[in-house]
Image: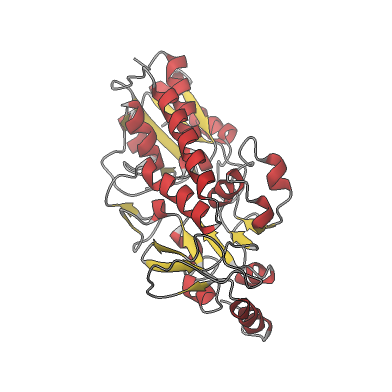
Amino acid sequence: MLPTATPAPIRAAALLAAGLLVLTACGGDGSTTTAAGGGTADGFPVTLENCGRTVTVKAPPERAVSVDQGSTEILLSLGLADRLAATATWTDPVMKGLEKANAGVERISENRPSSEKVLDKEPDFLSASFTSTLAKGGVAPREQFERLGVPTYISPADCAGKDNSGGGDGARTAPLAMDSVYTEVRELARVFGVPERGEALVEKLRARVERATEDVDASDTSLLYWFSDSKAPYLAGCCGAPGVITEELGAQNVFDDTHDEWPQVSWETVADRNPDVLVIGDLTRTTQTAESAAKKIEFLESNPVTRTMDAVKNRRYVLLSGQAMNPTIRTVEGLERVAAGLRGFGLAG
């Protein structure tokens, strides 16, 4: 819950009085706005339809808080480290090339922070990668920040074509496409007033996808994606970020018969499906069993159910960061690594 003591309303009043940002239940298009200090910001207000809400940003944020690693890495990739007041919720080391930019951003929590910690940074914009982050049981529901004048943004990849109303990590009603990730990049770039940077980043990502998939035909190869936990493993269903990787390579996901984002499946069922290659999440967090790739491989090679699988006997493992298995710009990194792994195993066509 958000704090009920007087500092929160005071902060909210200050934000609203400054005319920095407004989020409305329904909005329209406008052409001008008054920026902080009384000037006019070109291209503002920016109004977006985001995961069932209309978000209007009246001026480029100066004290944004990004409460998921994927969202943070997009902002850092757009050269916006100086506009980030804080970040939180990390599963992996920062993406290569962003180390210096990330070092200057305060990390208020390795996991999901409390709403109090977020508000202590006096944010003028809040971004997240997952619907669950800004919901009951997460940092706080979106509307609680909105009532304080703090607009919120969630990655469209986690809501477009996805049902998050049930338990777990939700289910896909339509396959994820990289266009959802590109949309997030472009929209965040617009919010911060740097649309040209968004277009440049999208073009770089598209070029990397094209290079990674060139001359690859893995139509005879089956994959399994293991994110975390050895007791009740979280494995990729058909249609999330691993589905993008699988589709781009023309391969098969052995659990393409489930639309759940990360279903928990028994090891007996895994062994029965006997994938050719195991794509393994190498996480640095410690919230569940077998987070690191080393622990996962140790389990696979010692467990009597899994050690007889073809992929285990032949050690056909591809290691990915957790973020590369989530729908974000690092999905491209995941695609590159899986493609390289298949080439190394002689399974790329």
- Figure check: 344 above or below 291: above
107, 347: nearer the viewer = 107
Dividing the picture into quarters, in which one does residue 60 lie? bottom right
What coloring was used for the rendering? Answer: secondary structure
- Figure check: 237 above or below 339: below
Q: Quadrant of the N terminus?
A: bottom right
Q: Residue at x 50, y 33 (%)?
A: 333
245, 61: nearer the viewer = 61
Left or right: residue 116 versus residue 289 is right
- Figure check: 110 above or below 4: above
Dividing the picture into quarters, in which one does residue 247 lie? top left
Left or right: residue 309 versus residue 124 is left
Q: What is the x, y in percent for residue 327?
A: 44, 45
Q: Would residue 179 be seen by someone viewing this image from the given angle? A: yes
Q: Residue at x 44, y 23 (%)?
A: 211
Among all residues in the image, which is located at the extreme bottom?
A: 6
346, 53: nearer the viewer = 53
Q: Residue at x 45, y 66 (%)?
A: 31
Q: What is the x, y in percent for residue 16?
A: 59, 79
111, 48: nearer the viewer = 48
Q: What is the x, y in percent for residue 192?
A: 56, 57
Q: Would residue 109 be seen by someone viewing this image from the given angle? A: no
Q: Quadrant of the C terminus?
A: top left
Q: What is the x, y in percent for residue 241?
A: 40, 41
- Figure check: 343 above or below 231: above
